[in-house]
Image (cartoon, helix red, strand yellow):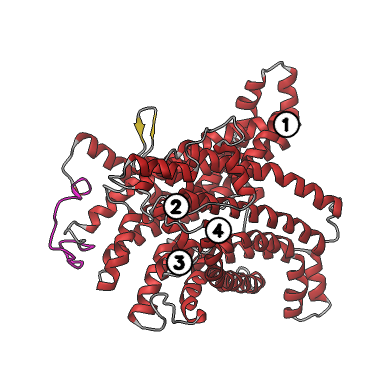
C-alpha cells in the first residue's frame, strides 16, 4: 500500500510539471505582456515599467535563474500567486471564496448523488414498465435543456415571481437562505445525466445471478436493492463521486454568477471579465492539484470496497 | 424455389459490412430517424444561411438586424417570438444563431478529431516513449477541470493575432473547445488500437510488408473509426452547450446574434417580464440537443452492440 502510494505520488510530479508548463505557455507566451492593459489608457511609460517590474514581466523568458519560466514554477510550488488586478493577493481571494463555494456545491452534489442512486435502484427494479420509460424520457429531456435556462427560469419563477427565495445574495442573509434556491436548481439540472448514468450501472448489476439468488431466498426487495445491489455497484459510484470532489471546490461558475454568491466561480467570472490572467492561472493550477490528489484517493478507495483489487 | 427463399438468398449474397449493418439497424428505429431528420434540418438551415450570406439574398435570417417592430413587442402573429430591445425579430435572430452554434460545434469536432485520432493511434501502435509522451500530454490536460480549461484557452486566444490572422468571435471559441476536447477521443482510440494491434489481420498486414503508416491509417483506423462517429454524435451536444456558456460569459460572438448572447440578454429582460427571447433560444437548443442525444444513443446501439446501454 505505502509503496503504491509513493509510486503514485511520484507519478504526479510530471503531471504537475505539465500543468505549470501549460499555464506558462498559455498565459505568458501566448497571453503576452499585459502591463499596458493593466496600466490602463493614457498611462505613462513610467507606470508601465513599474507594473512590468512588479509582475516580473521585464525579466527574460527562459535561460536564467531569475527568468519568468523559473519564477512561474517557483511561485506556483510555494503557492505564491502574486496580486490580482485589484491589488489583493490572489491567494487571499481564493481562500475567501472557498467557503461560499463549498456551501453551495456540497449540498448540491450530495443531493444529486443520493437522489439519483436511490431512484436508479428503484427504476432498475421496475425496468421495462411505463415508469421506467417515463423516467428515461424526463432524463433525456432534462439533459437537453441548457443549464442557463434552468437557472434563469428557476430564478425568475421561484424567487422573483413567487417570492419563495431571496433573489440575490446579500450579507445579512444566513447561508441556508441564500444557497437554498441555487442548490435546488443545481439538483434539478444535474439529475438527468446522473440518473441515466446510475440506471445503466444498476441495470448491469441487476442481471447478475446473485440478485436472483437473493430474491429466491425470499429477501425483501428493499434488502436486495439497498444491501446487495448497491454494495456491488459501489465502484462506478465511487469513481463518479470522488472525481467530482475537486470540482466542488471550484464552485459553480454560472450559479454563483446569477445569484451573486461571492465564491470561486464568481471570482473566475470576474477574472474573465477583467482578463485577470493571474487569478485564472492560479485557479487552473490549484484545481489540477486537487484533481490529481483525488484521483489517487479514488484508486485507494477501490481497494477498500473491492478486496479483489490489490494495489501492489 | 419459393419467393421467401429467393429473398433470403438475395440478401445473403449481397453481403454486408459494419456501416450497412448499422444503417439497417438505425432505419428500424423510427424515433432515431425522426431525430436524424431534425438534425438534418438544423444543418441545412445553417448551410442555407451561409449560402444566403454568400449570395447576399435578402431573406429573413440574414435581415436579422432590421427593425421588425417596436422594442420588446410580445409574440404576435407578425413576430412569432416577439422582438428584442432594438425591435429586431427574435425568430430571425434564433434562426441565425443556428449557424453560429452549428459552425462552432462542427469546427470544434473537426479540430479535436484531427488532433486526437492520429495521436491516439500512434500512441497505441508504437507504445514505448512516444506513448508515454502522448499519455503525459493528455493526462495533464485532463487534470484541469474541463470548463476551466476551455475558459483559460478562450480568454487567452481571444483577440490574439496569429500569422496575421486575428482570432475574433467564434474562431476563438471553437479553437478553445477543439484544442481542449481531443483528450477523450485520443484516449478511446489509443485503448482500442492497443486491443486491435495483436489481432490476426494486423499480423497479416505486417507479414505482407505493409508500411507502418499504411497499417495505422488503412488497417487500424477504419476498424476503430465507428467509435469516433459515436463519440462525436454525443459530444456535439456538449460543444453546443459550451458555446452557449462561453457566449454568455462574453467570450463568444459579439456582433452577430447567437443563442448564448440571446440568453445573456434575457438575464436583464426577464425581470421586466420579457420571456420570449429566452424561450426562443431555449427551445432551439432543446430540440437540437434532444435530437442529438437520442440519435447518438441509437447510433451507438446500432454500430457497436457491445457498448449498448439499456
Where is mark 1, residue-wise? B127
Q: Residue at x 42, y 71 (%)?
A: A259
Asked if the magenta segment contains residue A22, the reply would be no
Give the spatial CA distance, label 4 vs label 2: 28 Å
Q: Residues within 10 Å of mark 3 (few under 14, many from 20)?
A: many
> Is A123 above or below relative to A166?
above
- What segment is highlighted magenta in the picture? B61-82
Where is mark 2, residue-wise? B242
Q: Position of residue A5 (x, y in %)?
A: 80, 52
Q: Residue at x 39, y 55 (%)?
A: B249
Q: Is residue B234 visible?
A: no
Where is mark 3, residue-wise? A255
Chain holding disc 3 = A
Asked if disc 1 and disc 3 are in contact, CB closer than 8 Å, the reply is no
Which of the two marks, 4 or 2, is nearer to us in this view?
4
Q: Position of residue A278 (x, y in %)?
A: 49, 50
Where is mark 4, residue-wise? A91
Which of the two marks, 1 or 3, is nearer to us in this view?
3
Q: Secondary structure at mark 3?
A: helix
Give the spatial CA distance, label 2 vs label 3: 15 Å
Give the spatial CA distance, label 1 vs label 3: 43 Å
Chain holding disc 1 = B
> Is B33 above or below relative to B110?
below
Chain holding disc 4 = A
Q: Secondary structure at mark 1?
A: loop
Q: Nearer the viewer, residue B74 or A22?
A: A22
Left or right placement of residue B46 versus residue B220 in this view:
left
Amino acid at each position: 500500500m505505502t509503496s503504491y502510494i509513493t509510486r503514485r505520488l511520484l507519478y504526479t510530479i510530471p503531471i504537475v510539471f505539465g500543468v505549470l508548463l501549460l499555464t506558462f505557455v498559455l498565459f505568458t507566451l501566448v497571453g503576452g505582456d499585459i502591463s499596458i492593459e493593466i496600466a490602463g489608457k493614457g498611462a505613462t511609460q513610467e507606470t508601465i515599467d513599474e507594473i512590468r517590474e512588479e509582475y516580473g514581466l521585464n525579466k527574460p523568458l527562459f535561460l536564467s535563474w531569475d527568468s519568468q519560466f523559473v519564477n512561474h514554477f517557483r511561485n506556483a510550488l510555494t503557492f505564491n500567486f502574486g496580486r490580482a488586478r485589484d491589488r489583493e493577493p490572489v491567494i487571499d481571494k481564493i481562500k475567501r471564496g472557498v467557503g461560499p463555494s463549498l456551501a453551495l456545491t456540497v449540498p448540491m452534489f450530495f443531493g444529486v448523488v443520493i437522489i439519483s442512486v436511490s431512484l436508479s435502484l428503484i427504476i432498475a427494479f421496475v425496468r421495462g414498465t411505463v415508469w421506467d420509460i417515463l423516467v428515461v424520457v424526463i432524463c433525456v429531456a432534462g439533459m437537453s435543456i441548457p443549464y442557463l435556462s434552468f437557472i434563469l427560469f428557476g430564478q425568475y419563477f421561484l424567487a422573483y415571481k413567487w417570492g419563495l427565495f431571496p433573489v440575490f445574495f446579500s450579507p445579512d442573509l444566513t447561508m441556508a437562505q441564500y444557497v437554498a434556491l441555487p442548490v435546488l436548481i443545481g439538483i434539478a439540472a444535474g439529475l438527468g445525466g446522473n440518473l441515466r448514468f446510475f440506471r445503466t450501472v444498476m441495470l448491469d448489476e441487476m442481471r447478475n445471478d446473485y440478485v436472483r439468488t437473493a430474491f429466491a431466498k425470499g429477501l425483501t426487495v428493499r434488502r436486495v436493492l439497498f444491501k446487495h445491489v448497491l454494495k456491488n455497484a459501489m465502484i462506478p459510484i465511487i469513481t463518479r463521486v470522488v472525481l467530482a470532489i475537486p470540482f466542488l471546490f471550484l464552485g459553480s461558475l454560472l450559479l454563483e454568477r446569477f445569484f451573486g454568491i461571492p465564491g470561486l466561480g464568481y471570482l473566475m467570472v470576474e477574472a474573465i471579465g477583467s482578463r485577470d490572467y493571474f487569478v485564472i492561472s492560479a485557479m487552473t493550477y490549484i484545481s489540477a492539484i486537487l484533481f490529481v490528489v483525488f484521483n489517487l484517493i479514488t484508486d485507494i478507495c477501490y481497494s477498500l470496497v473491492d478486496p479483489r483489487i490489490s494495489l501492489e | 424455389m419459393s419467393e421467401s427463399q429467393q429473398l433470403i438468398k438475395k440478401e445473403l449474397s449481397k453481403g454486408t459490412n459494419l456501416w450497412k449493418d448499422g444503417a439497417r439497424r438505425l432505419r428500424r428505429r423510427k424515433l432515431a430517424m425522426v431525430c436524424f431528420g431534425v438534425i438534418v434540418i438544423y444543418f441545412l438551415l445553417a448551410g442555407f444561411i451561409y449560402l444566403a450570406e454568400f449570395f447576399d439574398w435578402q431573406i429573413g435570417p440574414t435581415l436579422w438586424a432590421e427593425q421588425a417592430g417596436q422594442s420588446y413587442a410580445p409574440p404576435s402573429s407578425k413576430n412569432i417570438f416577439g422582438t428584442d430591445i432594438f425591435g429586431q425579430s427574435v425568430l430571425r435572430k434564433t434562426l441565425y444563431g443556428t449557424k453560429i452554434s452549428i459552425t462552432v460545434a462542427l469546427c470544434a469536432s473537426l479540430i479535436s478529431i484531427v488532433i486526437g485520432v492520429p495521436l491516439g493511434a500512434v500512441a497505441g501502435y508504437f507504445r514505448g516513449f512516444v506513448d508515454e509522451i502522448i499519455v503525459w500530454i493528455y493526462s495533464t490536460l485532463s487534470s484541469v477541470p474541463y470548463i476551466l480549461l476551455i475558459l483559460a484557452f478562450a480568454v487567452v486566444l481571444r483577440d490574439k493575432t496569429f500569422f496575421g490572422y486575428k482570432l475574433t468571435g467564434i474562431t476563438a471559441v471553437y479553437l478553445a473547445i477543439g484544442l481542449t476536447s481531443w483528450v477523450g477521443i485520443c484516449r478511446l482510440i489509443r485503448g482500442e488500437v492497443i486491443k486491435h494491434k495483436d489481432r490476426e489481420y494486423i499480423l497479416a498486414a505486417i507479414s505482407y510488408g505493409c508500411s507502418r503508416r499504411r497499417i495505422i491509417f488503412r488497417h487500424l483506423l477504419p476498424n476503430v473509426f465507428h467509435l469516433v462517429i459515436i463519440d462525436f454524435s454525443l459530444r456535439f451536444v456538449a460543444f453546443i452547450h459550451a458555446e452557449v456558456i462561453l457566449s454568455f460569459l462574453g467570450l463568444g460572438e459579439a456582433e452577430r446574434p447567437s443563442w448564448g448572447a440571446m440568453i445573456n440578454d434575457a438575464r436583464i429582460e426577464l425581470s421586466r417580464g420579457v420571456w420570449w427571447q429566452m424561450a426562443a433560444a431555449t427551445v432551439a437548443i432543446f430540440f437540437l440537443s434532444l435530437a442529438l442525444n437520442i440519435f447518438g444513443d441509437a447510433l451507438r446501439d446500432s454500430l457497436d452492440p457491445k457498448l449498448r446501454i439499456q
